[in-house]
Amino acid sequence: MLIKGLTIYAEDNVIEQGYIKITNGKIESVGKANDVTDTDTIQFPNTYKCLPGMIDVHIHGAQGADTMDASSTALDTISNALPQEGTTSYLATTITQQHSNIEQALSNVGSYINVQPAGQAEILGIHLEGPFINQEKAGAQPYDYIIDGDISLFKKWQKLSGENIKLVTLAPEIKNGIALTKYLNSNGVVASIGHSNATYNQVVKAIHVGASHITHLFNGMSGLHHREIGVAGAALMRDELFVEMIVDGIHICPEMVQLAYHSIGKERTILVTDAMRAKCLKGGVYDLGGQNVTVSNSKATLDDGALAGSLLTMDQAMRNMLTYTDATLGDLTTITSKNPAKQCGVFDRKGSIKENKEADLIILDEHNNLVMTICRGAISYER
């Protein structure tokens, strides 16, 4: 396949009137279009743009399916739905629940990864959100199943998953939280601070043993105060931390997104959806970790009013960033592709447009609306 005529946001430069040649699912070459031709050429208007496919490191479900359903059908549904929003790979995200439910989900994802079909968003691994979190910041995480840090239990779960747990959301201030953080880091798993009531000093202690990520900034964490800046303040000022943001205008207001991005910058920001199964569906009542979630007016809430994930799509998050902040399309390739690829340990093969990398690509029109998604060289969505 040859794509040509549009502006290409490559890893090291922006190429106007460019081309990308794809062979066997990989990028064979990138450059200025000139007279290059191929039998399978797709010509785009010069107002269109090609960006690397987006990577969502925090998503529970979509189109009626959830990671916790623990079925290959559910993962098929999610993986086929995500290219419709420009997501070409993701971390299947669990929720705090009974151990047996978590274990079934982990085992299911581990098995699915080994046989995942081509032409859909690729599961890069698992984001274990909870249960090692602070009950005071449970949010939509089921309160009754929250537990202390437990290295032996994590070892069991990692084995069940086929070594596919790549990122763990935990609260470092809970019992054994620091020890678990240190263990995760020393074993190549990203330790992310979230659903945490930690003080700034407790966050710094966690950073010193390897914490490198913040789960959904401002949500489920100790906030900014002028005498204690908490997890949120640490996220803004500590360069060691990558920081997730749910930019739907609901979880964080546009002005706070602007303030946070001004502090954090493109090199540490990661856009996520934290979407639940109701994404792509109509309003109604849905399940999240055994709890009823009411979806109305683009908002998902528990019975007590707490936000319960989002209905956000990655392409809308991208457009919101362009509206709320001074981020450019070039910046967005960093915060939707490069940074998450680095955190997932796959930047050698994904996360940017470069020769010999996998052909995960999105095409946008002149209004930055999604036109096409290509997953590992196969057209997975076409408007």
Image (cartoon, grey):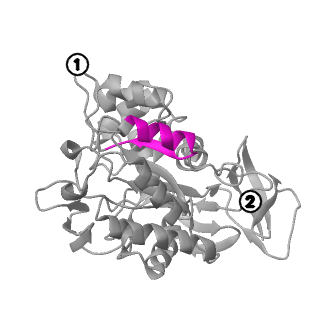
Examine the structure image and report whether residue 52 is included in the region drawn in magenta.
Answer: no
Q: Residue at x 70, y 45 (%)?
A: 11
Residue 104, percent across and down? Answer: 41, 72
At label 2, counting other C-alpha atoms closer than 10 Å, the crowd grade (few under 14, some 14-19, many 20 or more) is many
Q: Which element carries disc 2, helix, strand or loop?
A: strand
Reading the image, the residue beneath label 2 is: 5
What residue occupies the far top of the structure in this picture?
227
Q: Indicate left or right for 8 with 226 as reference.
A: right
**Is residue 66 something one can see in this rendering?**
yes
Front of the two marks 1 and 2:
1
Q: Indicate left or right for 309 with 293 as reference.
A: right
- Above or below, 212 relative to 296: above
Considering depth in this image, is 314 or 138 the residue closer to the camera?
A: 138
Residue 65, percent across and down? Answer: 38, 75
Indicate the quadrant where residue 334 lies. top right
- Above or below, 112 relative to 267: below
Q: Which element carries disc 1, helix, strand or loop?
A: loop
State the extent of the magenta-drawn residues as a range: 178-194
Q: Residue at x 87, y 67 (%)?
A: 37
- Above or below, 284 relative to 22: below
Location of the C terminus by quadrant is bottom right
What residue occupies the far bottom of the structure in this picture?
73
Q: CA distance from mark 1 to mark 2?
A: 52 Å
Residue 151, percent across and down? Answer: 43, 48
Considering depth in this image, is 161 or 344 the residue closer to the camera?
A: 161
What's under tag 2, amino acid-wise? Gly
Reading the image, the residue beneath label 1 is: 226
